[in-house]
Image (cartoon, rainbow, N blue to C red):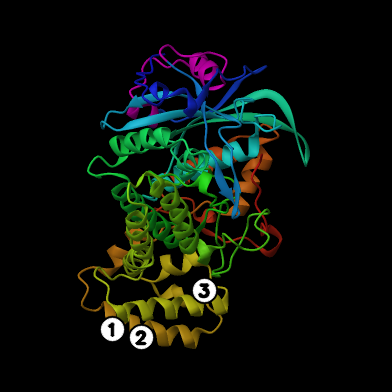
Amino acid sequence: MHIPFDNSYATLPEAFYSKLAPTSVKAPKLLAFNEDLATLLGMEGASNDEVTATFSGNKIPQNSDPLAQLYAGHQFGNYNPQLGDGRAILLGEVIDTNGIRRDIQLKGSGRTPYSRGGDGRAWLGPVLREYLVSEAMHALGIPTTRALAAVATGEDILREQGMLPGAIVTRVASSHLRVGTFQVFAHRGQLDDLQTLTDYAIARHYPDANGPMDLLRAVCAAQASLVAAWMSVGFIHGVMNTDNCSIAGETIDYGPCAFMDDFHMGRVFSSIDQQGRYAYGNQPNMAIWNMAQLATALIQLSQDKDAGVEEATAIIHAMPDQIEAAWLARFAAKIGITTATETDRELIQALLDLMQTDGADFTNTFRALPTATARDQFTDRDAFDAWAQTHTARIASEPDPTATMNTVNPAVIPRNHRIEEMIEAATTGDMAPFERLSTAFATPYTLTDTDLANPPSEAEIVPATFCGT
């Protein structure tokens, strides 16, 4: 199998990483392989055996330069001065057929110098969750890391639930640079390394940026767009720590993530988010908070610190309006409006208020808006009918509101109860539910498997999701 590696991160100073190979596994078995993504990456001649050996970590491909990346980060608001890839190995980078540089990383590939006492492994459930949810996000048009392969290791690992089957997911990202990558060097006072990282990030992601503050401005814009996209599909990341925040503006580190069923601004699923820090409705605030931490790091490169603080403050203070504008554009399209006004914001909010009061299903309500069945999502149908009358009058001048709505409101999402059913089946060796979901999530705006659009029954509700470490 040929992977056209073209590694750049491995050429940076040794302070940025630890070079080491993944730990081999006992009896690897290929569970899933993303042929379309492999083609995009320029991979050729991939036999089943070679794919299995490579993406289990048992075979190091030619021209790979494996390493674990160093970073720090704020975890639920508390700064940890050293984190890093504790269970991941960057095999290397390729330039895909679109000319975009991509990282190829094994997650669950064994201990590294950053494991902090962990086993460096992943169990099957979170691996398959990340594979399906990241690919679903890609199909929804939301910037994200992608899944290339999932391999069972043939080894059990110990977690709170007991011994569980181990697995490795191979994920692809435009990079794995995080806010925490900048924080570690700023915190340590390694300003030469911080400058090198900043120059590298600009060259790789934002070549039009002119210096650290321009980089901050570009990352803030990317994050504003990303969090609005999450909100528009009811996605809750669950663990928006600065070490899980990509400066490329991609969704990264799928841990206790979830999609809402019934709508509520305060919805939380993550079992470790006891205070609701990363609740659905608080995600914009947390994106801004994360960018403030990036600003704090980048200010260290300013020759005039006072001027740097002033400029960075202005950039961060502009973020709420950026997010609000991106949110309004996204949600206006969800109700069939192509160019939104402030009055439309009130119309959108009125619908969300009705949905929250009634516990209406987020995905199905928006999907049903072009039809007469939308009112069936509500118990107070008179209240919805009054809203619908105003809505109908508003979209009367739109060129094709139904087409607008149907291209942004998915018919199927990765509902938590379906993901849990899939994981339970996979632990017994039954991959049929995984294949079913994979097929459905690839075309989320076309409902071919009607059962997957149904919200959970009361007995099927998943109250909490878990990280898997």
Q: Do the residues labelled 1 and 2 touch (CB within 8 Å)?
A: yes
Quarter occupied by residue 360: bottom right
Whether residue 174 is visible to the viewer of this picture, yes or no, is no
The answer to whether 322 is drawn above or below residue 241 in the figure is: below
Which residue is label 1 attached to? 393
Amino acid type of the residue that numbered disc 3 sits on in the rendered structure: Gln
Question: Magenta segment range?
Answer: 37-63
Residue at left offset 47%, top offset 23%: 14
Q: Residue 177 placed where, x, y %?
A: 43, 38
Q: Compare residues 463 and 435 and report the one nearer the observer.
A: 463
Which residue is label 2 attached to? 389
Measured Cα–Cα span from mark 3 to mark 2:
16 Å
Amino acid type of the residue that numbered disc 1 sits on in the rendered structure: Ala
Residue at left offset 45%, top offset 74%: 374
Which residue is label 3 attached to? 377
Q: Are marks 1 and 3 in contact (CB under 8 Å)?
A: no
